[in-house]
Image (cartoon, rainbow, N blue to C red):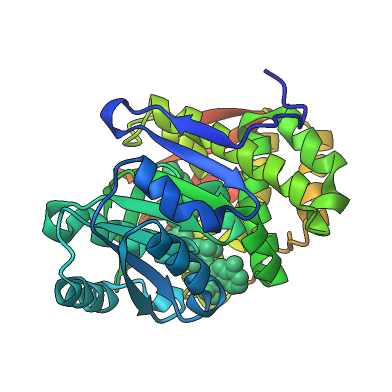
């Protein structure tokens, strides 16, 4: 069904049999967290995991809502930053859960961006062999991508997201108004993931983003609700068909293979994730042009939209050998061959297998 930006919906369901859950997208949704947790049968202590930036902004509202609904509340704060998405922080969280008496009759709330969501989700997946958890994402990237679909995890010194579990939340509660405090850089980075859905899966959504870019960039909340809803709907459709990434779910990695390599060779200190995805989408679109799956005109439209979203399309300087070895180490690489997602025009994808060498040539990174 073409996307016309007229949903008037606020709740979607991710249908995964006994692991099904709702995604609620509203302005002001934070205040309803407690009641919504009651209505899905959660009980006991609500352990709210957040970070040192988000807790002062939204911790109070979340805490009050949970208390008013009758829960005991334990606030657990972790430091802010990808560099803390690791086993040391996780151990600290386990200590705090133990001290607070959180057991399987309690639940965890992840309040924050993708870093908090991934780590808190993994804590929930592993604490006492699994306690229920609720995602309350507060960055655009987390609202349109990481809070939905059950990928949880932490980084290992040798690689990002190497330790993790598929573990679905019991509810995703998205308060789009929280984006008003997000800095411009992370907002634009989130738009990288938004464009991904349009280019790889839905041409009418791509057109919608293009036509509404001023409203999006000026943070018009009604438009942002439409955008977040559509991304979540597209992601839910993919996850429902391929929860554990046996095949189709790889499409969500459009722009990620080469983008992630650039993120990694910058030691995660240069590009943030969504910025790297934007570079990766440019390169994936170039591969698609080289394979005659995408016209130069569609390439130009994709590139122009990325720029209008405040993202750079300039390929950072790189060391060829390092880039090749980083691409080869990708989680989607098997025996030297990488599952790579191209765009067929705008709105459709195509999956193929390439060596890192081929990808560098096809993407124009080397002549
Ligand atoms: P992030 O969690 O680091 O958040 C970015 C910054 O924004 C942080 O400083 C954070 O404290 C701050 N912040 C969060 N919400 C805010 C708000 N409302 N107002 C002001 N500041 C706020 O980064 P991110 O881009 O949200 O997430 C990136 C992480 O997500 C990476 O670790 C990546 O691996 C992971 N990820 C996971 C999945 C998945 O499917 N699980 C998908 C994509 C990315
Ligand atoms: N962000 C990719 C996925 O959830 O599969």
- Number of disc labels: 0
Where the N terminus falls, by quadrant?
Answer: top right
* Residue 120 placement: quadrant: bottom left
* Residue 66 placement: quadrant: bottom left
Residue 253 located left or right of residue 222: left
Rendered view: 77 above or below 348: below
Residue 140 located left or right of residue 55: right
Q: Position of residue 358 (x, y in %)?
A: 51, 44
Which residue is located at x 72 percent, y 69 percent?
184
Which residue is located at x 64 percent, y 67 percent?
186
Residue 326 located left or right of residue 129: right
Q: Is residue 86 visible?
A: yes
Which residue is located at x 18 percent, y 57 percent?
126
Q: Position of residue 265 (x, y in %)?
A: 48, 70
Residue 92 located left or right of residue 248: left
Rendered view: 65 above or below 99: above
Residue with the most extreme left position: 128
Rendered view: 126 above or below 255: below
Q: Position of residue 112 (x, y in %)?
A: 48, 65
Residue with the most extreme top position: 1
* Residue 44 placement: quadrant: bottom left
Q: Position of residue 199 (x, y in %)?
A: 67, 37
Q: Is residue 355 visible?
A: no
Which residue is located at x 14 percent, y 60 percent?
103
């Amino acid at each position: 069904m073409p996307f016309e930006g007229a949903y008037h919906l606020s709740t979607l369901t991710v249908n995964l049999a006994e692991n099904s859950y709702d995604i609620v997208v509203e302005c002001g949704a934070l205040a309803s967290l407690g009641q919504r947790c009651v209505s899905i049968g959660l009980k006991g202590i609500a352990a709210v995991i957040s970070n040192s930036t988000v807790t002062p902004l939204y911790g109070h509202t979340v805490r009050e809502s949970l208390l008013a609904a009758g829960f005991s509340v334990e606030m657990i704060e972790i430091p802010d930053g990808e560099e803390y998405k690791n086993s040391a922080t996780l151990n600290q969280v386990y200590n705090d859960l133990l001290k607070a008496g959180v057991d399987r009759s309690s639940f965890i709330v992840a309040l924050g961006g993708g870093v908090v969501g991934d780590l808190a989700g993994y804590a929930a997946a592993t604490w006492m062999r699994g306690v229920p958890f609720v995602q309350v994402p507060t960055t655009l990237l987390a609202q349109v991508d990481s809070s939905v679909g059950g990928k949880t995890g932490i980084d290992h010194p040798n690689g990002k997201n190497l330790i993790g579990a598929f573990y679905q939340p019991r509810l995703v509660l998205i308060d789009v108004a929280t984006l008003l405090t997000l800095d411009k850089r992370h907002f634009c980075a989130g738009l990288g993931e938004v464009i991904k859905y349009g280019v790889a899966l839905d041409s009418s959504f791509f057109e919608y983003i293009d036509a509404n870019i001023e409203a999006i960039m000026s943070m018009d909340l009604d438009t942002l609700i439409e955008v977040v809803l559509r991304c979540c709907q597209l992601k839910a459709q993919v996850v429902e068909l391929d929860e554990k990434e046996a095949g189709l779910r790889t499409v969500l990695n459009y722009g990620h293979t080469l983008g992630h390599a650039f993120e990694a060779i910058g030691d995660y200190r240069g590009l943030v994730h969504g910025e790297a995805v934007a570079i990766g989408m440019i390169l994936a679109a170039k591969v698609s042009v080289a394979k005659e799956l995408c016209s130069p005109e569609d390439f130009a439209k994709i590139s122009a939209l990325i720029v209008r979203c405040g993202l750079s399309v300039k390929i950072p300087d790189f060391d060829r050998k390092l880039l090749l070895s980083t691409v080869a180490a990708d989680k989607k690489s098997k025996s030297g061959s990488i599952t790579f997602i191209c765009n067929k025009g705008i709105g459709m994808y195509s999956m193929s297998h390439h060596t890192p060498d081929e990808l560098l040539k096809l993407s124009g990174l080397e002549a």
